[in-house]
Image (tube, grey):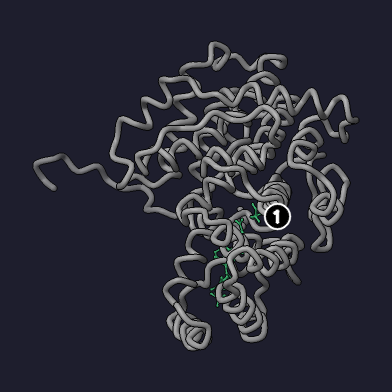
Amino acid sequence: MTVTRGLEGIIATESSISSIIDDQLTYVGYDIDDLAQNSSFEEVIYLLWNKKLPNETELNQFKSSLAQEMTLPQAVINHLQSYDLSTVHPMAALRSAVSILGLYDEEADTIEESANNRKAIRIQAKISSIVTAFGRIRKGLDPIQPKQEYSYAANFLYMLNGEEPKDLEVEAFNKALVLHADHELNASTFTARVCVATLSDIYSGITAAIGALKGPLHGGANERVMSMLTEIGEEDKAIDYINEKLENKEKIMGMGHRVYEQGDPRAKHLREMSKELTKITGNSKWYNMSVKIEEHIKEHKGLPANVDFYSASVYHSLGIDHDLFTPIFAVSRVSGWIAHILEQYENNRLIRPRAEYVGPKKQQYTPMEQR
Ligand SMILES: CC(=O)SCCNC(=O)CCNC(=O)[C@H](O)C(C)(C)COP(=O)(O)OP(=O)(O)OC[C@H]1O[C@@H](n2cnc3c(N)ncnc32)[C@H](O)[C@@H]1OP(=O)(O)O
Ligand SMILES: O=C([O-])CC(=O)C(=O)O
């Protein structure tokens, strides 16, 4: 047996959802640059789930079905209010809350196609309400009901902050959601597919995927990028800080990627947004510091920035709490997880690779009293 550590380069499935070819990312064949520039997040969700762009009527219907499903069961809110949110990481709370959401969905345990399509809408709609409710409850505030007339991006910011978001904020947040929506067979998507390939249900698949996204080598990196920038504090300290980390063989969060060699095509959009948002904050420190780090790592390690690097300063500029960065990634990526889960069900086979056994062999069993 040949072991490929981390399954690098292994083609584990066929998929017609997103592709990365020659460092270019497409969703259903549409270039991410075009989608980031032109589309709403709702349009992208529709594209990922239906493999075609919606016409105006289809999009309006889709938007309204999402907006109608955003309200959370009171039991989920009660659950969020029942523990000490000052000590719980929001990704842990989200993982548990999505699982609990399944307990209040009468169709949770069926994997029948039309039920799955209805659950897809419910989960996509409600995940944003869970994250924003968490963000408010821990500050002693009540969750806010979404506005039917708002877009998904605008509703998220509104439900989090309780005030009408500015156009530039909605535009930036919508673009971030579009850019994070899907990414071929990344670790959390693979996790979701492995889970449902046992013919388990969609809530189990999403709960498992949230657990995988939480880790710092994956979605958890965006929060840690902001911790790093905050720890550095001043622009002129950035290079010494990074050099020390590299000398200690520590990884720089938001840098490097398993698949991209030259660079992550999403990073340039987030870099531009990070720069643009300094217009709102009047503070270009985090953007300037990020550029310095990116250039230094590229030059000295040959590693490009990934999607998590500039999303940190983008979300910070939008006034979002740092530990909500990864939950926001989940709010977007759940669209991709659902698309992959539905694709897995369509042509399912149990995912069960092998391990090469390297432990001791032919051991003699010793009775307890002789050990
Ligand atoms: C949305 C996302 O999930 S994007 C990724 C988010 N994660 C991060 O930003 C965390 C930081 N980055 C990393 O840890 C890695 O680049 C990963 C996990 C993303 C991909 O890495 P892999 O393909 O598994 O590469 P691996 O971790 O084996 O690293 C290969 C070499 O590059 C180095 N390297 C990779 N990334 C980094 C980094 N960010 N900082 C410093 N060195 C790095 C490793 O130390 C290793 O060096 P060595 O060969 O001298 O030991
Ligand atoms: O594809 C990966 O390995 C990680 C990533 O960039 C993502 O999930 O967006």
Between 171 and 241, the residue placed more toward the observer is 171
Please say if 204 is above or below 369: above
Please say if 59 is above or below 68: below
Dot 1 beta carbon under 8 Å from ligand 2: no
| Mark 1 secondary-structure assignment | helix
Where does residue 38 sit, x and y in percent of width and height?
A: 85, 49
**Left or right: where 153 falls relative to 361:** right
Residue at 79% across, 52% down: 36
Displayed-image quarter of ligand 2: bottom right
Residue at 72% across, 14% down: 114
**Left or right: where 179 falls relative to 311:** right
Q: Residues within 10 Å of mark 1 (few under 14, many from 20)?
A: some
Is residue 98 visible in the rendered image? The answer is yes
Between 28 and 74, the residue placed more toward the observer is 74
Where does residue 341 sit, x and y in percent of width and height?
A: 67, 31
Q: Residue furthest top?
A: 106
The image quarter containing residue 150 is top right
Between 198 and 312, the residue placed more toward the observer is 312
Q: Residue furthest right?
A: 55
In the rendered picture of this protein, how many numbered marks are placed on residues? 1
Is residue 353 visible in the rendered image? The answer is no
Residue labelled with disc 1: 168
Q: Amino acid at mark 1?
A: Leu
The image quarter containing residue 315 is bottom right
Residue at 43% across, 40% down: 136
Where does residue 32 sit, x and y in percent of width and height?
A: 81, 53
Where does residue 141 sit, x and y in percent of width and height?
A: 39, 38
